[in-house]
Image: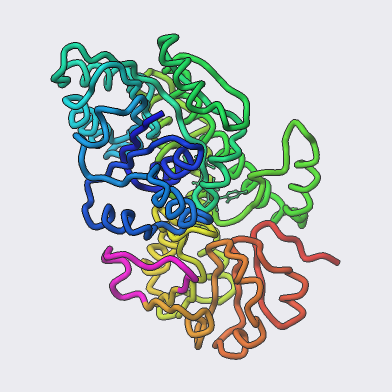
Amino acid sequence: MTIAVIGPGYVGLPTAAVFAELGHTVWLLGRNAKKNAQLQKGEVYLHEEGLTELVQKNLKAGRFRPTTSYAEAIPDADVVFIAVGTPSGEYGEADLAAVFQTAKDLAPHLKEYTVVVNKSTVPVGTAERVAKILSEHRKDVAATFDVASCPEFLREGTAVADAFHPDRIVIGVASDTARDLLLELHRELPGARVVTDPKSAELIKYASNAFLATKISFINEIANICEGVGADVEEVARGMGLDSRIGPKFLKAGVGWSGSCFPKDVRALHHIAFSNNYEPQILKAAIEVNNDQRRRIVAKLRTALREPLQGKTIAILGLSFKQDTDDIRESAAIDLLYLLKNAGAYVRLHDPVAQPDTRPIFHDTAFFVDAYAACDNADAVVIATEWPVFKELDWVRIKNAMRQPVLIDGRNLLDPAVMRTNGWMYEGVGRAIKP
Ligand code: UGA
């Protein structure tokens, strides 16, 4: 088939590359000429395992076609995916400006029959609103279309592998023609098919992300109880996760969930509930527990340093919102940065891949490409991202270069017993001191 993917970001780019690899001709449409030129040369601007190889291979084969032109991408496409951003609006609602603008821009180029698919995470009812825009803005009155919802479940950092091995493919459609075309498009991929109506598909996406975020907040709450009673959350999570009804995934306690998806999607679902006269209590609690996890890290620093944080130097290891990505959107490290700076501390930041952006919060924050340099002369160090390379650091060398041996492990990466034996004042999240 010929398909078009609009929005060459963390969702659109891997999606386009994987469909090209499956043998389809894929137009990847983005408005940014610089990024488009990079893609045309096979240069991938995202940190995603396996993506560069896939892009280069399919570019060469002529199946992967980056473009900035709607006129080029849309008329021949059997299926058009909208994969643009839906950031949080002022009240936590999903901001659909980019989705609606995309619908307006693509409508005049529709020809014959096209299935337009919302891949962006969008509130319930968006498929209908996009259909209305397409009807109003199409030029060719003979052009027909269906609007479907196929939410994505890719994780950043493992998006390519996730796209090739989905647990399920959700197809929210209102017509048999669209259903058959989308089933055919995904034929080569494994995983269960969930064929449903567009509204249910839209809600499946929010409910899935909100459930995972709630699962993490739940284990973080258990971790906080562990700290009170002297139990170890790693042991508790292991014992819980072996129950097949619970499962072991997303039970890693720590500084809390962050990133470009969970925070905005949980807020958006909360907003959707309120707008439909329901006060969502579990979502509210999941958000509150998550905010508290950041504050608890700062409280641990205060306790360990036995004095106010004013004038103290704190090293934060990790800026990306999780390992294997350079994405820093709504990362826990940024929340910690705000909290520590408000408390009057100096912050020294390190990440093996991610970089600070232009926001004022980073202006007077020292950034180091070297972890050892970041910790030099610090009063305490906080691990904010679960980068596996942090485990391999020479922690004795770090301790010897610090003013005080205080380590708050916000990701439970290190072994508390080993660290304490090595002279660290070590605190993880919900980790007991074993006898
Ligand atoms: C998430 C979902 O997992 C994807 O299925 C979904 O497609 C995506 O959002 C999206 O909506 O686009 P992602 O945000 O890339 O994927 O990252 P996750 O691996 O889910 O991690 C989210 C946050 O939870 C990270 O900050 C991570 O460190 C944290 N986390 C995850 C924990 O604190 N504990 C865990 O056990 C797992």
Specify whether 233 is left or right of 403: right
Res 62 seen here = yes
Give residue 368's position: percent from left, percent from top.
Answer: 43, 79
The residue sitting at 35% across, 21% down in the picture is 115
The residue sitting at 22% across, 46% down in the picture is 31
Give residue 271's position: percent from left, percent from top.
Answer: 37, 30
The residue sitting at 56% across, 67% down in the picture is 383
Give residue 330's position: percent from left, percent from top.
Answer: 40, 53
Magenta-drawn segment:
350-365
Q: Residue furthest bottom?
A: 400
Vertical order, 89 against 360 (above or below): above
Closer to the camera in the image, 327 or 255: 327
The N terminus lies in which quarter of the figure?
top left
Closer to the camera in the image, 305 or 258: 258
Give residue 111's position: percent from left, percent from top.
Answer: 23, 20
Say which quarter of the image contains residue 312. Answer: bottom left
Res 86 seen here = no
Specify whether 210 is left or right of 145: right
Is residue 143 shown in magenta? no
